[in-house]
Image (cartoon, rainbow, N blue to C red):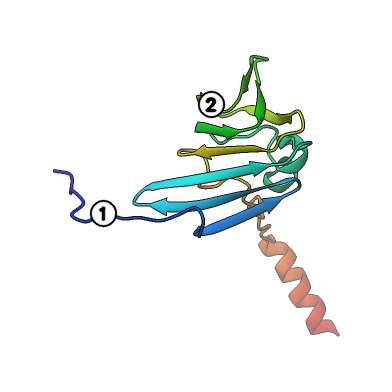
Amino acid sequence: MAKTRKSMEKKTLSSPDDVRTFDKGKVELATVGTVTFGRASLEPGWKWSESVKPIVKTEYCEAPHVQYHISGRLRVRMVNGDEQEFGPGDVGVVPSGHDAWVVGDEPVVVIDISGMTHYAKPAARKVVKKSAQAKKGKKKKRLRQ
């Protein structure tokens, strides 16, 4: 049987748990229970593939989004070529595998309730383990010196 929460929890995006900045934009995050709310503020000229891709190092945005658009216009293109434009008052679901960009001269503000937990987090650095042979070779070399 699932546990039910016995108390309310409240946070505000005006005092977020985390802020992630990138070229021409930022996301402010607040986690309540198991849901991370994100407010993205994107300036004119922002494009995911130019502003966030260099940070996350994926070909397309891999975050699925459930969003409410407050202001500005955002164009989204899926890997399969489908495109949609979102504006003030629009709600939408955008699966992973897309690029997006601000349309026009007005900043975009969007609230997201599903895809911001890892959004714009730097790609994990891969640790390369040296083989046992390479380690032995270095150890022998030190002993000879």
- Mark 2 neighbour class, 10 Å CA radius: few under 14, some 14 to 19, many 20 or more: some
Name the residue furthest right: 145
Coordinates of residue 116 in the picture (x, y in percent):
53, 44
Front in this rendered view, residue 133 or 5 = 5
- Mark 1 neighbour class, 10 Å CA radius: few under 14, some 14 to 19, many 20 or more: few
Q: Using the image, determine if residue 74 lies above or below residue 129.
A: above
| Residue at screen point 59% across, 56% down | 19
Name the residue furthest left: 1
| Residue at screen point 78% across, 38% down | 50
Q: Quadrant of the N terminus?
A: top left
Coordinates of residue 44 in the picture (x, y in percent):
76, 37
Say which amino acid is labelled 2: Pro
Q: Nearer the viewer, mark 2 or mark 1?
A: 1
| Residue at screen point 68% across, 15% down | 81
Coordinates of residue 133 in the picture (x, y in percent):
71, 63
Q: Using the image, determine if residue 121 lies above or below residue 130.
A: above
Say which amino acid is labelled 1: Met
Q: Using the image, determine if residue 140 lies above or below residue 84.
A: below
- In the image, 90: left or right of 136? left
Alpha carbon separation for disc pair 2 and 1? 30 Å
Where disc 1 sits, the SS reads: loop
Q: Earlier in the sequence, mark 2 or mark 1?
A: 1
- In the image, 2: left or right of 20? left
**Residue that mark 2 sits on:** 95
Label ID, residue 8: 1
Q: Quadrant of residue 105?
A: top right
The answer to whether mark 2 and mark 1 are in CB contact below 8 A is no
Q: Quadrant of residue 132?
A: bottom right
Label ID, residue 120: none
